[in-house]
Amino acid sequence: MEQLRRLCCGTTSTSGRLNDVLNILGNVIARYSDKALSIVKDGTDEDKTMYGSFVARKLLESAACAILARMDPPRFLILQEYQQRAGSNYKAHERHPASIQWCGDIIPEKAANTLWSNELAPDKFIRALLGGHLAEATWPMAIDLFARDTVDKSKSQWVEEVSRTYEGKLQQANAKSAHVFGISRESDSSAKSPSSSVGTLVLDVFRNRFQDNFSELSKGVHLEFVVDETVVLDPETVVEHMLAAVKLVSQLGFLSSYLDSLFAKSESNDAFELILNVEESFTK
């Protein structure tokens, strides 16, 4: 699906090593999103239970990696260099220490209570997609810009869902601020928390949703059950997990168009049309 590829990989006419990386990831995204659409729309129950979780998890991982590659190019150029130097000697039976890992590169390994401590050295910076220094320095501002955008969010249920999440977190932040300072919302409706803190709260929501979806899909990939797994992972449930994966990567790809430092950045209006197209393809 070209639209999802463009949402996650952006648009560029330039050549170069990072563009080569994005082309490779983009091919994976296009291939597995096409397969996911085929399974969701026309797959048999056996197709859904046997292949749905694997296809969606592959899509979730590749799309998340593509967005991260555009945010943190050196991470992927270094990995590419490792793999090219290894060539045919690359040990497929071993996990390479430099390889991309879900826990660490997409989801931070652990919460850092002293994330912005002045004592933290640069080699300790956390550069995961959805948490840590890189994420908090980029996503909250982008989410805030999205919230202020005048685009008609109601045209897309997936985009509107992000907007509702933001508004909900904004109300919670205002209520908490009013409680701390002894101000009621009725007496001072203008009380506002910094928008960046609301963006961070929305980032937390995305991190939790991505991790939950990854775990759900993993149960359909790994051998876990010694009872009939279709009792838990029936065709309808697998499709729900697949649609959740497509929606999450589409939403994050769309939000990436509001980042102020991104390789191959798309215009937000173009990204809106892309996510609308993906949504209609999977849900209509």
Image: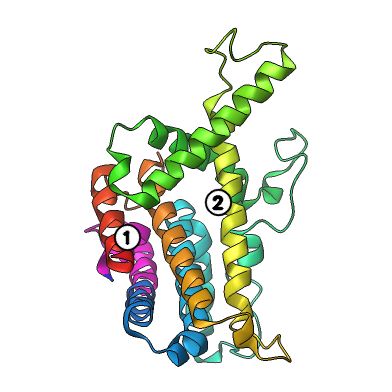
Q: Identify the residue under disc 2.
A: 206
The residue closer to the viewer here, 69 or 216, is: 216
Does 81 sit above or below residue 136?
A: below
Q: Is residue 166 left or right of residue 274?
A: right
| Residue 274 image position (x, y, % from top left) | 26, 56
The three-letter code of the residue at mark 1 reads Glu
Instruction: Please state the extent of the stretch shown in magenta in the rendering.
Output: 2-26
Does 142 sit above or below residue 53?
A: above
Does 27 sit above or below residue 184?
A: below
Q: Is residue 1 left or right of residue 260?
A: left
The three-letter code of the residue at mark 2 reads Phe
| Residue 206 image position (x, y, % from top left) | 55, 51
| Residue 140 image position (x, y, % from top left) | 52, 37
Q: Identify the residue under disc 1.
A: 279
Image quarter in which the C terminus is found: bottom left
SS type, badge 1: helix
The residue closer to the viewer here, 67 or 208, is: 208
